[in-house]
Image (tube, rainbow, N blue to C red):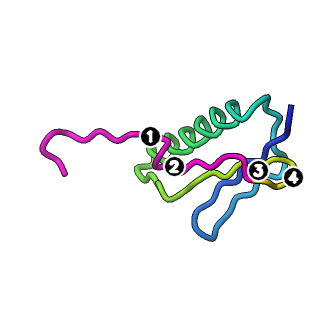
Amino acid sequence: MANYYSHLRDGDDVLIDPDGRELPSIAAVAAATLFEAREIISHDARSGLVRLTYHIDVEDSSGALVHHLDFEDAISLVRSPGRG
């Protein structure tokens, strides 16, 4: 298994993952990243402010970008009929 590092980014601000974690495949990286994004979004929703400006970049141990997820792509919003 390879080690992958998930970095949370918002514009110029970055929360670096110094430890990473071992995952068996890129498909597992994508699933774990989606889970992480949704966990952050659900936590933010409880406070009433969801920032869809964040994204997660996942790098392998050599620093190569192997996956990218924008928070706005992690969820779907359904509005009431008649609302814009």
Pointer 2: what residue?
71
Q: Earlier in the sequence, mark 3 or mark 1?
A: 3
Which residue type does callout 4 highlight?
Ser
| Viewer-side label of 4, 1 | 4
Pointer 1: what residue?
75
| Callout 2–callout 3 Cβ contact below 8 Å | no
The front one of 79 and 26 is: 26
83 within the magenta span: yes
Distance of label 2 from label 1 (alpha carbons): 7 Å
Badge 2 density bin: few <14, some 14–19, many ≥20, Cα 10 Å: many
Distance of label 4 from label 1 (alpha carbons): 30 Å
Relative to 68, residue 21 above or below: above
Q: Secondary structure at mark 2?
A: helix
Residue 15: x and y, percent?
A: 70, 58
Distance of label 4 from label 3 (alpha carbons): 8 Å
| Viewer-side label of 4, 2 | 4
Which residue type does callout 1 highlight?
Ile
**Magenta residues, start to end:** 65-84
Q: Secondary structure at mark 1?
A: loop
Quadrant that contains the N terminus: top right
| Callout 2–callout 1 Cβ contact below 8 Å | yes
Pointer 4: what residue?
62
Distance of label 2 from label 3 (alpha carbons): 17 Å
Pointer 3: what residue?
59
| Callout 4–callout 3 Cβ contact below 8 Å | yes
Q: Earlier in the sequence, mark 2 or mark 3?
A: 3
What's the residue at 76%, 50% (across, down)? 59
Residue 52: x and y, percent?
A: 47, 54
What's the residue at 52%, 43% (across, down)? 43
Distance of label 3 from label 1 (alpha carbons): 22 Å
